[in-house]
Image (cartoon, grey):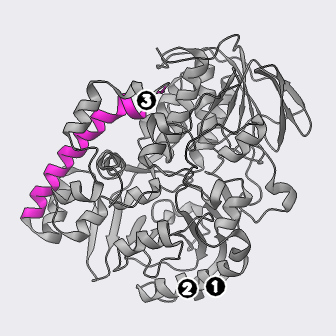
Amino acid sequence: MTRTLPGPTDHVVVVGAGLAGLAAALHLLGAGRRVTVVEREELPGGRAGRLDLAGYRMDTGPTVLTMPELADEAFAAVGESLRERVDLLPLHPAYRACFADGSTLDVHTGADAMAAEVERFAGPAEAAGYRRLRDWLQRLYRAQMRRFIDANFDSPLNLLNADLARLAALGGFGRLDARIGRFLSDERLRRVFSFQALYAGVPPARALAAYAVIAYMDTVAGVYFPRGGMHALPRAMAEAATGAGAELYFGQRVTRLERSGERVTAVVTDTARIPCDAVVLTPDLPVVYRLLGRRPRRPLRLRHSPSAVVLHVGTNRTWPHLAHHTISFGAAWHSTFDELTRAGALMSDPSLLITRPTATDPGLAPPGRHLHYVLAPCPNTDIGPDTATWSDLGPRYRDTLLRELERRGLHGLEAAIEAQCLVTPADWHALGHAAGTPFSAAHTFLQTGPFRPRNLVHGTRNAVLAGCGTTPGVGVPTVLLSGKLAAARVTGLPLRRRTRTRPPAAPAHGGRTGAPAPTGCPVPPRTPAARTSEGGTG
């Protein structure tokens, strides 16, 4: 049995209406708790927010949805279904990979379709290698999911189980690059199955092979897109939570936690005091530690993942060679990771993720118009340009990216732009994200599993953390799981599907309930006062 909160937990306040906070709220409601959710922004979603700009509806956070069954678990906790709330569209292909030599590869999640594509791209030997790789990825996922990903840890001793031996036998503690290379000799194919490690904050050459589980989620389990954009998911979760009796308050900045000894007794906002029996904290770790008034002791300082510059553009044209998700690889590879994680320099030959959501949902833009998001990994502010530098660097780097994209075939891109929003590490920092990165603490060995910042708080008996800074880590599937795991710390119950009777929602404290219509931009450069505000982004 893992540890749970002692004492009463009848009323739980969740700070933050991001994916982690909403998942926690739904699981808590399903376990019979009274739940209040407090969010500093005017809409749910946290990182998965939305910007309405000149008729374009832009997702401001994640653009890739995998493992939707984890979201469905949260809905099922209150007797609902993800697919009844959200029109979920599978993407075919999941990605299109474009390489510097002019070759392209469509990444399919079906085994036969992908094997045929790999054979076309690189020959029958590589197709056979892909089938062996796929089998390994499936076994790797089965060895990790129950005991290492969907699991609370009280001690490193929790690692000592039969699945640890299975993971070791599968080579999970070797290096990701080398392990993928056992199946595929084509360097381009190896990139497709290892680039995901970057978003966990570790170059493929240094990442544990166990992190290939991210490639499993992308290339085997499938990639989906909610009609209406990724923000449709947290919006639906907020509506389900309200329908199940939760009180949701938006535009409420949490200023402090009232305490009595080692227990939090109330959450205080700009306008209200909300008594509680327990609290789930989902903002980024610096905000959480400031609210708690203490920072856990660690032998080593936390290392953070690389950050990203994101350019959102609404255009009057598109480029047919772009899929919904297109990865445009530069010629450079290993040197790119050195620049991002060691030298603190912008990529000299960038690999970019280009998302064209209007390829799947044209309603996200005005008639005849198109949306494109360009994500360029960049160093975080701990090792790269600081927040002040980005005020001048950002617009110049935008121009550099546009020139590079035009060189890679998006001819006339700059002239086609009708609306745009540029997000840099300075903007992530203004939202309270440590080191100016939305990807939080890197998944090095000593920051993974039981070594990651724990979701229980030493010195506070009734607080639990959720979000990408704690277990199990970064990414939509793991953030959803973090909310579930936080709820399990509160309830002490195995959180399974259950039916429920819908109680009426009851507004209180003068707050607003439900999911309001999105207004404003959740990622603008903030004023100095807003930069210190607390609330939810997890």
Question: Is disc 2 in contact with disc 1, using a CB cutoff of under 8 Å?
Answer: yes
Q: Residues within 10 Å of mark 3 (few under 14, many from 20)?
A: few
Which of the 4 quarters of the picture holds residue 311? bottom right
Question: Is disc 2 in contact with disc 3, using a CB cutoff of under 8 Å?
Answer: no
- Residue 396's tag is 1
Question: Is disc 1 in contact with disc 3, using a CB cutoff of under 8 Å?
Answer: no
Residue assigned mark 3: 156
Image position, residue 111 (x, y; %): 19, 50
Residues at marks 1 and 3, CA–CA distance in whole angstroms? 46 Å
Residue at 50% from the left image edge and 16% from the top image edge: 498
123 on left or right of 50? left
261 on left or right of 190? right
Image position, residue 71 (x, y; %): 49, 36
Q: Is residue 487 above or below residue 232?
A: above
Specify the segment rendered in magenta: 125-153
> Can residue 150 be found in the magenta stretch?
yes
Determine whether the residue tagged by mark 2 lies in a helix, strand or loop: helix
Image position, residue 375 (x, y; %): 52, 68
Residue assigned mark 2: 400
Quadrant of the snapshot with the C terminus: top right
Depth-wise, is mark 1 or mark 3 nearer the camera?
3
Q: Residues within 10 Å of mark 2 (few under 14, many from 20)?
A: few
Which of the 4 quarters of the picture holds residue 253? top right
- Dominant secondary-structure state across the stretch colored magenta: helix
Determine whether the residue tagged by mark 3 lies in a helix, strand or loop: helix
Q: Which amino acid type is shown beneath numbered disc 3?
A: Pro
Mark closer to the chain start, 2 or 3: 3
Q: Which amino acid type is shown beneath numbered disc 2?
A: Thr
Residues at marks 2 and 3, CA–CA distance in whole angstroms? 45 Å
261 on left or right of 212? right
Which of the 4 quarters of the picture holds residue 333? bottom left
Q: Is residue 226 visible?
A: yes
